[in-house]
Amino acid sequence: MHNAEILSDNNLYIDSLSFSRGGNDIITNLYLTCGPNEVVGILGRNGSGKSTLMKIIFGQTKPDFAFMRCQGEKFEKGYQTRKIVYLPQEGFLPRQLLLSEALHFFELDDPNLLQLPFIQQNFKNRLSHLSLGMIRFFETLLILHTKHSFALLDEPFVGLSPIYIDLIKEHIQLVKHRKGILISDHYFRQVMDISDRLYLLKDSRLIQVLNEDDLIFGGYLNHMD
C-alpha cells in the first residue's frame, strides 16, 4: 500500500511525523496520504492533535520530525508550495473587509461562486455586519474554491446552522474532483458522510475507521451517542 502511494506524485504525502510538547508525545510517527480528488476525515477528542497536525502540514507549527511531500515536491512548510491552503479554527479574515474585497483578494477557481444568493445578498457588506456563523461559512467557501491543490479544513462546521452545513458539504463534493481535502470536525457524522477515508487520532497515532462501531471501540463515542 505504501509503495503504491509513494509512487503517486499527485498525492499529499506525510510520513514519520512526530511532535511533542512539554515532554508529552502529541503525534508519533504518523503516516497519512491524501489524493488530489478525495476527502480524508480525521476525528479525535479535544487535545488529540488534530489541529496540530494541520498546522504542521501548513507550516504554522514545527514538528520534531516529518517527511512531507506535495505532488512530488518535498516541503517543510505547506504554504510555501502554493498548493496547500488552510482553514484554521479561528477566523482569519479582517472584520473590516467587504465581502467583495475578500473575493477579489483570493484567486478562486469557480466564477459561479459569485452567483450564490449568500454572496449576492452580502457582496457590499463588511464581515463585521455578519454573524459569526455566516463569516465561518464565507471563509470556508473561499478556502474550498481557491486554486490550491489541497485544502486543510479545521472544524469548518462549528457554529454553522444546519442549512449552511449542508451547503458546505455540497461544495466539498463540488470541488473534490479537482482538490484533495483533509477535514476535521466534532460533527463526526457530517465528516463521516463526506469522507472517502476516515481516521481517529488517538494516543498520538492514527487508527483507520470504517464505521461508528470503530469509533465506539476506539473510545471516541459512547454506546449512547
Image: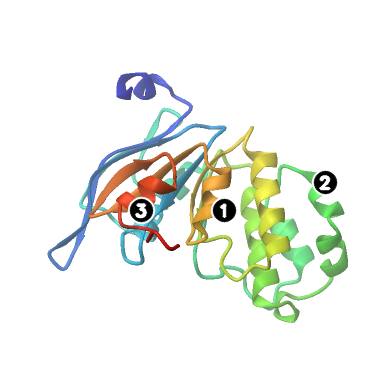
The answer to which of marks 2 and 3 sits earlier in the sequence is: 2
Q: Residue at x 43, y 63 (%)?
A: 224
Measured as percent of width and height from the top left, residue 76 is found at 34, 45
The answer to which of marks 1 and 3 sits earlier in the sequence is: 1
Residue type at numbered disc 1: Gln
Q: Is residue 21 left or right of residue 182?
A: left
Residue 136 in sight from this viewpoint = yes
Q: Residue at x 47, y 46 (%)?
A: 41
Residue type at numbered disc 2: Asn
The residue indicated by pointer 2 is: 112
Q: Is residue 35 left or right of residue 54?
A: right
Asked if marks 1 and 2 touch (Cβ < 8 Å), the reply is no
Residue type at numbered disc 3: Ile
Say which element carries label 2.
Answer: helix
Q: Label 2: few (<14), some or many (≥20) within 10 Å? A: few
Say which element carries label 3.
Answer: helix
Q: Residue at x 35, y 38 (%)?
A: 32
Specify the quadrant that holds the C terminus: bottom left
Q: Pick the residue in front: 202 or 3.
A: 202
The residue indicated by pointer 3 is: 216
Specify the quadrant that holds the N terminus: top left
